[in-house]
Image (tube, rainbow, N blue to C red):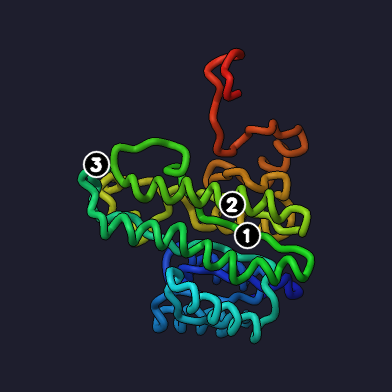
Amino acid sequence: MPEGVLEGVALVTGASRGIGRELVLGLARAGWAVGALARDAVALDEVVEEVTAAGGRAVATAVDVTDARAVAAAVHALESELGGASLLVNNAGRIEADEAAPWEADLEEVRRVVEANVLGPFHLVRAVVPGMVARGGGRVVDLSSGAAHKDSPVHAAYGASKAALFRLGGALSAAGREHGVLAFEVSPGVVRTGMTTSMAQHSERTEWTDPADVLALVLAVARGELDAWAGRLVRAGVDTPASLAAAARAGLPDGARVLGLLPYGPGDPLA
């Protein structure tokens, strides 16, 4: 399975199915040792077996990312076996089951979405990034969404959580840059997964983002090819490593692809 020498150690959350599973397989194929985290131990074992059978290296630990102590223990166990991670992919996430207006949202669903999509990545950052800092650097990829920067009448918790995740990534890059730690927001587009096919808004969709396009962006980030895009949003199926590298060479404006407040005009006091 591996295409060359060992690239490093990557940790991937939500690794048992969907995009996370594809990332584990793709990273292993590209020569990374992968620590796979998810709640479903059986499905995780199947992913690890597939990687191992193809000659790659992966280990797994079942964990709920909303449990800070469990996350810390899981990361410690994986890094003890594989070595310190130089790549963290925050992929685990969820969305509300119902497409409801904000005032009709189920509060338990809201809580679960925010805990998974915001607190979960915070827990991983706290468990993984100190080691990156100590070793001189690393990269964090957040699986983002267009919902982070575009208003929608439904799935308000999901949109709010992805905007918060975007801000966490920006803060991580701002604080971590001097230590060689950078964070990137990668929107996967609409990949055909159990989550997307359960959403009414995608019930008639016929065109889907290829998971290979998501993997290509993650690998480019992991190899340091897109460092100019730290703290910014890139989208699979629209952006490619080549197009992003070309845009970076041409020069990225300060506000390009970041969360921010646009001025209403030259006299705006908040500009």
Q: Disc 3 to disc 1, how far (Cα)?
A: 32 Å
Residue 73 visible within the image: yes
Mark 3 touching mark 2, by CB under 8 A? no
- Label 1–label 2 contact, CB within 8 A: yes
Observer-nearest of 231 and 8: 231
Up-down: is 44 above or below 237? below
Q: Secondary structure at mark 2?
A: helix
Q: Which residue is mark 2?
A: 169
- x, y (%) of residue 171? 62, 50
Q: Is residue 116 above or below residue 254?
A: below
The percent coordinates of residue 252 (x first, y second) are 71, 34
Does residue 250 appear to the left or right of 22 in the view shown?
right
Amino acid of disc 2: Gly
Work out whether residue 31 can be spotted: no
Q: Which residue is mark 3?
A: 101
Where residue 24 appears, as percent x and y from the top left, is 55, 70
Residue at the far left in the pictured view = 104
Label for residue 140?
Answer: 1
